[in-house]
Amino acid sequence: MNPPNILLIMSDQQRADCFGFEGRKVSTPHLDRLAKEGTRFSACITSNPVCQPTRASILTGQLCMTHGVHDNGIDLDPEVGEKGFAGTLAKAGYDTAFFGKAHFSTYHTFEPTGSPECVKSSADFGPNWFGPYMGFQYAEMMLVGHNWFLPEKPPLGLHYEHWYYADGQGDEKNRLYQLGRSDTHGAAQTWHSQLPVAWHNSTWTADRALEWLKKPERKEKPFCAWVSFPDPHHPFDCPEPWSRLHAPEDVDLPKHRTRDLDQRPWWHRAAIENEPQGPADNVAVRKAYSRIPPQTDQQLREIIANTYGQISLIDHQVGRMLIALEEAGLAENTIVIFTSDHGDWLGDHGLMLKGPMLYEGLLRVGMIVRGPGVKADQVVAEPVSTIDLAPTFFDLAGVEAQLTQHGESLRPLLEGQAVQRECARSEWELLPGRVGVGLSLRCVRTRDAKLTLELKTGVGEMYDLQADPDEMRNVFDDPSYADLREHLIALVHARPDDAGPVGKAIGSA
């Protein structure tokens, strides 16, 4: 058989339990079908809980202290990025393409960087630039995509922004986007956007991918495409009618939604209460955009219902792409993957969004794989990570990696082999810009337990996920768990010895 095509579809900030097949009251019929026809991983974690590091890790197959993007605001070195899975597969004869939100480089920088993703530099690329970028031979991208920041007006911006303003109606679209309808009871960053769905960036991302997938050339050589949606990231601004699909009174609330900071490691409180550091505009954005105060149950229902709408809109776009593969005769030899860069607390423990508290809602992400050789209707409980994607792609395509791989191929698990994984790793060298304090967090997750260690102070937290799946009891200092703690700490220190130095931020994110 010819080398398989690879279609990687990704959402942004979607928890692993926010799928219909996970039991939550969210409508995801196409993703549910994808999971039924393929394999899903119930213990897949992100290698880092914020955007830039984990996206660089997916591309390279490396943990963030090795590729260097260990926090938002640090760019991936193009020489490294070009040796990731896209560039490697391109050298092996694949057509490679990227659509949507990339975020391999920093958007909001202190100075122009020359990257197409840098807002200050984006005008240098213009409407006729379509790559190459980070190993992808073809690219149609957007800047940011989370419309707390409205689409940049040309000559700034990339493909989505140029398209958005091309008809001269951009200002009217922005007015409609910001226009909410009905009362959301003061829920933070939540409204029913009046922007018509045809102009929404989820629709645009799928449209651009579909046009590329339908071209006759797709049948002539194998392809690898990454389609990256910027939702369900905050603000919670789902457009109508999708924002009305889930009634707030019907959604499921977190079981434990009260902050208990006195029972947690010191950095939990520091991350919430410290003043962010950096330029005044960065501090203002971090406080207004990256932090959400405790919400009432009614407000939380509004946020969750809106988030579910964002997810269902993405699910609809996934369905369109699956249909296109069938109609083009490509489905039989295409590996389709759906995952996310990281999760969202979404009210767990009284927290919203993301930060250095590595609860399951943030750390665990969905991972669904369907395609030739993949066992159908299979659930794998072994601990895996999104950095396993690159080595999986190399294995399936029969090519050698150009970079050291920290992940392992998922192929044996996808084929139904009884392979055991000891742990999956996540790490974050957090600069003080986000929460006002620098942290060196290293995390390991096994099937039944999870430990996070702050290397600078030696303080940690550990949860027995089998006995305490809601992570209510930190057993790091419990003598009865001493053997497990030492074992997990040893796994932390067993990380490959190729970590680089701590970098310096060139912007906020």
Image: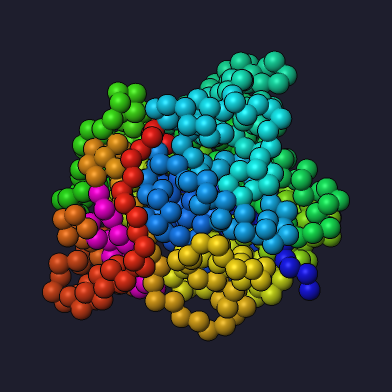
Bounds of the magenta segment? 439-454
Q: Residue furthest front?
A: 79
Residue 120 shown left or right of residue 197 in the figure: left
Where does the C terminus fall, quadrant-wise?
top left
Please tell me whether residue 191 is drawn above or below residue 366 in the rendered image: above
Please tell me whether residue 326 is drawn above or below residue 377 in the rendered image: above
* Residue 453 counted in the magenta span: yes
Of 102 and 367, the residue lying toward us: 102
Residue 463 shown left or right of residue 171 in the figure: left
Q: Residue drawn 20% across and 78% down? A: 483
Of 200 and 196, the residue lying toward us: 200
Q: Position of residue 160 (x, y in %)?
A: 64, 31
Q: How many marks?
A: 0
Residue 479 shown left or right of residue 154 in the figure: left
Query: Mainly helix, strand or loop, the magenta region?
Result: strand
Q: Position of residue 113 (x, y in %)?
A: 47, 31
Q: Quadrant of residue 204?
A: top right
Visible residue check, residue 194: no
Where does the N terminus fall, quadrant-wise?
bottom right
Q: Quadrant of residue 176?
A: top right
Q: Residue drawn 49% across and 40% down? A: 105
Q: Residue drawn 66% across and 40% down? A: 131
Visible residue check, residue 150: yes
* Residue 271 counted in the magenta span: no
Colouring mode (rainbow / by chain / secondary structure / one colour): rainbow
Q: Position of residue 99 (x, y in %)?
A: 65, 43
Of 438 and 178, the residue lying toward us: 438
Q: Quadrant of residue 205?
A: top right
